[in-house]
Image (tube, rainbow, N blue to C red):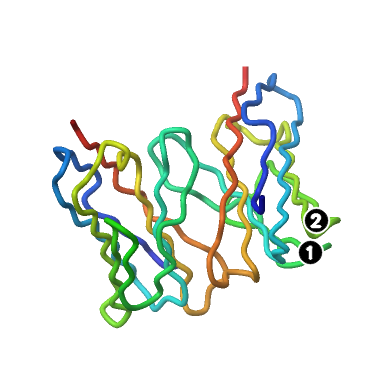
Amino acid sequence: DGGITQSPKYLFRKEGQNVTLSCEQNLNHDAMYWYRQDPGQGLRLIYYSQIVNDFQKGDIAEGYSVSREKKESFPLTVTSAQKNPTAFYLCASSIVLAGQETFFGQGTRLTVV
Amino acid sequence: GIQVEQSPPDLILQEGANSTLRCNFSDSVNNLQWFHQNPWGQLINLFYIPSGTKQNGRLSATTVATERYSLLYISSSQTTDSGVYFCAVVSEYGNKLVFGAGTILRVKS
């Protein structure tokens, strides 16, 4: 099946630890994105990438890092510098940057304990 | 940047009722999508509709780009329609999808 796979579905992290969220797509899309959603709110853009080996900061990039070494993969690292990391994280992709339809993965719920 | 406002923020319907959700945006757009977020958090694509009208079963959507708004119609609502409905746009000179705050829909049986 074509789609976007995020793992894990649930993640618990101790304060001060870095954690990496996985996102893989087999849609052959060039552009990929990471969004954050807090309870009762819309989605905010963390990072985006329009092509392999290139990525740009979104609106709330502080405390996060990404890499894009392969077209199908766009992992997000939540670092210890992120002051309030507990949230729902959604990965997305589209054929080209901001072009046509954007599709989303099922999300990873991160909780800091 | 572009602003996206959705109304109403909350809506409670009896099963079988019809509803209209609205999305206003502050600038010209190249891209507009409607999503349904189910109780498990999954964002489901409903419509890609930067202009015009589309229908898919009980759902339809209309975007009037010149007047900067889009409407999502839900007819004969079912309990499975419950969830949050998001409108998201890409402005004419932008490169990212910007989301509204969403409309929370509760359909009662």
Q: Report the number of numbered marks.
A: 2
Q: Is residue B77 above or below residue A97?
A: above
Is label 1 on the same chain as label 2? yes
Tag 2, which secondary structure? loop
Residue of label 2: A68
Question: Which sits earlier in the primary sequence, circle 1 or circle 2?
Answer: 1
Q: Quadrant of residue A78?
A: top right
Q: At x 53% / y 73%, what residue is drawn?
A: B94
Q: Is residue A25 above or below residue A90?
A: below
Q: Quadrant of residue A83?
A: top right
Residue A51 percent coordinates (x, y): 76, 67
Would residue B77 appear left or right of B90 to someone viewing this image? left
Find the residue positioned furthest to the bottom: B66
Residue B102 percent coordinates (x, y): 34, 49
Q: CA distance from mark 1 to mark 2?
A: 7 Å
Task: Name the subunit of mark 2.
Answer: A
Residue of label 1: A54
Find the residue positioned furthest to the top: A113
Would residue B57 appear left or right of A27 to someone viewing this image? left
Task: Name the subunit of mark 1.
Answer: A
Mark 2 belongs to which amino acid? Arg
Q: At x 70% / y 43%, what residue is drawn?
A: A64
Q: Is residue B15 above or below residue A30?
A: above
Residue A108 percent coordinates (x, y): 61, 35
Residue A47 percent coordinates (x, y): 66, 54
Using the image as rendered, state which of residue B65 and residue B79 is in the foreground: B79
**Label pair 1/2, CB-CB below 8 angstroms:** yes
Mark 1 belongs to which amino acid? Asp
